[in-house]
Image: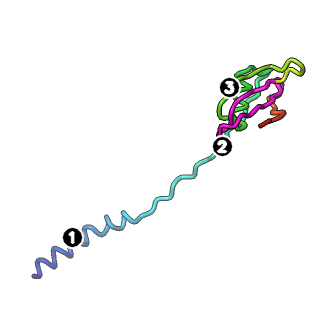
Amino acid sequence: MPKVLCSLFAAAVALAPAAALAQYLVPEPPVAVVPAPLAVVPGGPLTEADAAMIALMHGMAVVEDVDVRMWDGNYEVDGTDITGEGIVMRIDPHTGQVLAIDD
């Protein structure tokens, strides 16, 4: 019986550092979060593809058509939102600003 106790004690002493290391918490290194820019405005007037991307960034799920309005030169982007309802956005071709959103 003393040999069994001796071997149990030796096993406990040998495994104690492993059990202590398993409970050791290592702090994670800090992570720097850099916010991404929302939009990059090109130097010249926007293209129809740029107007479609701006509409997608402002809640349009599917872009169906992009037209230039003859009377003011703004882009009119037709499409649907995430619920499937029709939506029309008017976008300034020089600044990329969304001028109106019509449901």
Give the percent coordinates (x, y) of residue 20. Answer: 36, 67
Mark 3 vs mark 2, foreground winner is 3
Q: Is residue 55 above or below residue 4?
A: above
Residue 68 spot, x, y in % from top left: 80, 19
**Disc 3/disc 2 C-alpha distance (Å):** 33 Å
Image quadrant in which the C terminus is located: top right
What is the x, y in percent for residue 37?
71, 37
Residue at the spot of label 2: 34
Mark count? 3
Neighbour tally class for label 2: few under 14, some 14-19, many 20 plus, Cα within 10 Å: few
Q: Residue at x 72, y 24 (%)?
A: 50
Direction from residue 23 to residue 41 in the image, left or right: right
Tell me which numbered mark, 1 or 2, is placed earlier along the sequence: 1
Residue toward you, 23 or 82: 82
Between tags 1 and 2, which lies in front? 2
Examine the image and state in which quarter residue 25 appears.
bottom left
Residue found 79% across the figure and 29% down from its top: 96
Residue 11 disc label: 1
Left/right placement of residue 26 relative to residue 55 reads left
Read off the residue under disc 3: 64
Within the magenta stretch, is there residue 78?
yes
Q: In what quadrant of the picture does the N terminus appear?
A: bottom left
